[in-house]
């Protein structure tokens, strides 16, 4: 399928996504093509995640005008895991100001795995960025509230406003992760030893683990992404979740560190900010256009969904999501290589 002349003209002149039917067709094509990819391993360091069906696969694009395009298992719920980090960062910046978050957490890539102890030690006890575990725990610790219940309520409500519906907690995932949470607890205690933890370290880990255990589907991820793409306004509810400046700041951090130590390769291949989670979700954002949510549990060595990465690279090109591409999408006439 190719763009008709009108579609291409629209992309060039307004920077919008191609027409509704074209987006619909390309989302279906992406799902069909990459469903056959068999690479990657389902995460097993959290026992509850190891039970995921590796064949589950959903692709959803939500545009900033609220149009929804879906293919595959887009309503299958899974725990949001690290994808929450980007959105809690936005909520914390909105609450305490991005200067404070910048100063206490930082925005540089560590170049090391998401639960690295070395990254803290090599950087004088500084978490470096909110997209790795210790930086995310420190970000969650900035949530306002008189006690843990209030702070957890702030995080949960904020993430729900991004999704446009009340997100439920998966108690099974929470229990499973809590039982084996010694590494995150160690990271948080290490940060506390450097005087960089504003609340009790173990409480912050517990709230962080709860936020990771909230259930979303691929469609929720696309809506959450579209909210950042639309300058902080949820396209389905019309509610402003964060200011446009905060949405912009969040996207910049996702671009540098959202895909862990593969963030450089991701930006090279896809050209758009994104955040992944170990349960197999990825949210990719095209500012001013929309959000792409994918779900497929098998992961690569950095913890990013293999099919999700392939879909994002294909759709970035085919839909014109790539921030760095100056030409209109050129590959839509070709069948993607699976
Ligand atoms: N990369 C991830 O999704 C990791 C999240 C997971 N809850 C952890 O803290 O290890």
Image (cartoon, rainbow, N blue to C red):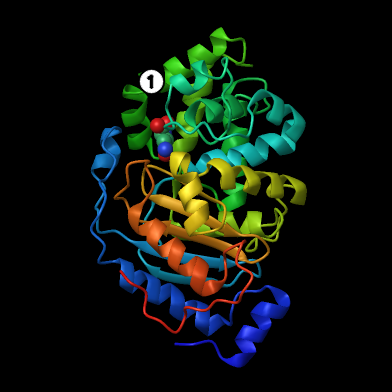
Query: In this orientation, which residue lies closer to the viewer: 97 or 194?
Result: 194
Q: In which quarter of the image is ligand 1?
A: top left
Residue at the (74%, 27%) spot, across then down: 100
Residue at image point 67% right, 25% down: 145
Judge the density around disc 1: few (<14), some (14-19), many (≥20) Cα neighbours within 10 Å.
some
Q: In this view, does 11 lie above or below 297?
A: below
Is residue 296 shown above or below 314? above
Q: Mark 1 points at which residue?
A: 183
The residue that appears at 38% across and 63% down in the rendered structure is 58
Farthest-out residue, bottom: 5
Rendered-image quadrant of the C terminus:
bottom left
Percent coordinates x, y for residue 96 in the rendering: 74, 30
Is 167 or 24 nearer to us in this picture? 24
Q: Residue 3, percent across and down?
A: 54, 87
Is residue 63 rendered to the left or right of residue 134?
A: right
Label 1 C-beta lies within 8 Å of the nearest ligand 1 atom? yes
Q: Is residue 296 above or below residue 9?
A: above
**Circle 1: element type:** helix
Q: Where is residue 116 in the image (x, y as percent from the top left)?
A: 43, 25
């Amino acid at each position: 399928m190719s763009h008709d002349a009108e579609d291409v003209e629209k992309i060039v002149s307004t920077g919008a996504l191609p027409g509704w039917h074209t987006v619909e067709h390309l989302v279906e094509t992406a799902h069909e093509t990459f469903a056959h990819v068999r690479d990657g391993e389902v995460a097993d360091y959290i026992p509850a995640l190891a039970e995921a069906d590796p064949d589950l696969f959903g692709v959803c694009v939500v545009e900033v005008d609220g149009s929804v395009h879906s293919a595959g298992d887009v309503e299958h719920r899974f725990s949001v895991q690290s994808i929450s980090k980007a959105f809690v960062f936005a909520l914390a910046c909105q609450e305490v100001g991005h200067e404070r978050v910048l100063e206490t957490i930082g925005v540089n890539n560590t170049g090391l795995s998401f639960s690295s102890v070395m990254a803290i030690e090599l950087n004088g006890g500084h978490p470096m960025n909110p997209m790795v575990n210790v930086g995310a725990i420190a970000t969650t610790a900035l949530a306002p509230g008189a006690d843990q219940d209030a702070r957890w309520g702030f995080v949960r409500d904020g993430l729900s406003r991004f999704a446009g519906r009340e997100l439920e907690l998966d108690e099974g995932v929470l229990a499973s992760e809590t039982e084996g949470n010694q590494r995150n607890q160690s990271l948080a205690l290490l940060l506390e030893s450097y005087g960089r933890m504003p609340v009790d370290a173990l409480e912050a880990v517990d709230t962080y683990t709860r936020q990771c255990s909230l259930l979303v589907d691929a469609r929720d991820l696309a809506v959450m992404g579209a909210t950042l793409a639309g300058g902080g306004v949820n396209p389905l509810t019309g509610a402003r979740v964060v200011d446009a400046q905060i949405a912009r700041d969040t996207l910049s951090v996702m671009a540098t560190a959202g895909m862990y130590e593969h963030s450089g390769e991701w930006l090279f291949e896809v050209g758009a900010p994104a955040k992944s989670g170990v349960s197999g979700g990825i949210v990719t954002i095209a500012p001013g256009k929309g959000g792409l949510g994918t779900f497929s549990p098998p992961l690569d060595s950095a913890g990013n969904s293999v099919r999700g990465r392939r879909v994002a690279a294909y759709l970035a090109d085919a839909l014109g999501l790539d921030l760095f591409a100056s030409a209109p999408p050129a590959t839509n006439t070709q069948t993607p290589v699976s």
